[in-house]
Image (cartoon, rainbow, N blue to C red):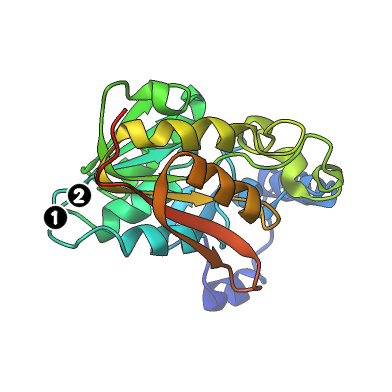
Amino acid sequence: MLDRAALAIALETPLKMEQLKTLENLLARRAQGEPVAYLLEEKEFWSLTLWVTRDALIPREETELLVECALDRIEDTTAAQVLDLGTGSGAIALALASERPAAQITATDVSLRALEVARVNARTHGLQNVNFRAGHWLNAVPEQCYSLIACNPPYVAYEDPHLETCHTKYEPQLALISGKDGMEALQKIIPAAPHALLPGGWLVLEHGHQQECAVDRLLHQARFDSIVHYCDTSGKSRVSAARVSVSFSE
């Protein structure tokens, strides 16, 4: 990547044929609506530059709110056990690992290709307090318990018209679509989460801005307490956090 000064100087440099073909290919892909992050194969998230491919969701600015909410619940010097479900490019797990080096982060994904992207990003940033597991949601970590579970699950309905009108059509649909109403993943994760949390442990979830009431209902049904909902910078409900009761038992 060139900075502005280097780019200004480079404007006077003629392109080689191979470079011109690469540029034309990138412009054609962009004209079709492919996101810039996939063209450049990188995306800034938190304080990290992440490698991204079409095997993983492009990290979103609103997901940084989830990271903030999780960090508020992980003490700086505590060797907390933290789980990131559906890690994708590793954005959440690596942001948490970089800010809480004493914590041990486990990142899971059902997609082996996405896990490889996350592993590369962890190596690139020298983050050694992250390990990776393959599997579907909590099935990836059977009989394990954590002090905090963070998750940005798919929460888009399969008939959502926005899927055909924005760059999400280039992203892995497995990471976006969750049943008829977008709640399928959340309906699986929330009831199961208390069994994978230590007493007093936290579940921090991202969800659609119209799903707060449904998520709140599921959290109450799963006997969570201290339920809090957070809005993103546009004022839309985006993240919910809840603590499993200290007295919870199966």
Where is residue 45 drawn, in percent x and y? 47, 59
Q: Can residue 152 be seen in this view?
A: no
- Determine crowd level at label 1: few under 14, some 14-19, many 20+ residues with C-alpha closer than 10 A: few
Residue indicated by mark 1: 78
Q: Which amino acid does label 1 sit on?
A: Thr
**Front of the two marks 1 and 2:** 1
Tell me which residue sits at (64%, 73%) in the image: 235
Along the line of sight, which residue is nearer the eye, 34 or 201? 201
Where is residue 26 drawn, in percent x and y? 73, 48
Where is residue 231 drawn, in percent x and y? 57, 68
Along the line of sight, which residue is nearer the eye, 154 or 192? 192
Tell me which residue sits at (60%, 73%) in the image: 233
Residue 141 falls in which quadrant of the image?
A: top left
Left or right, 31 with reference to 138: right
- Above/below status of 133 relative to 202: above
Where is residue 93 drawn, in percent x and y? 36, 46
- Determine crowd level at label 2: few under 14, some 14-19, many 20+ residues with C-alpha closer than 10 A: many
- Above/below status of 5 relative to 201: below
Residue indicated by mark 2: 103
- Spatial separation of the CA atoms under disc 1 and disc 2: 6 Å
SS under mark 2:
loop
Look at the numbered discs 1 and 2 and tell me whether their residues touch, using CB distance below 8 Å: yes
Left or right, 91 with reference to 24: left
Left or right, 134 with reference to 158: left
Left or right, 217 with reference to 96: right
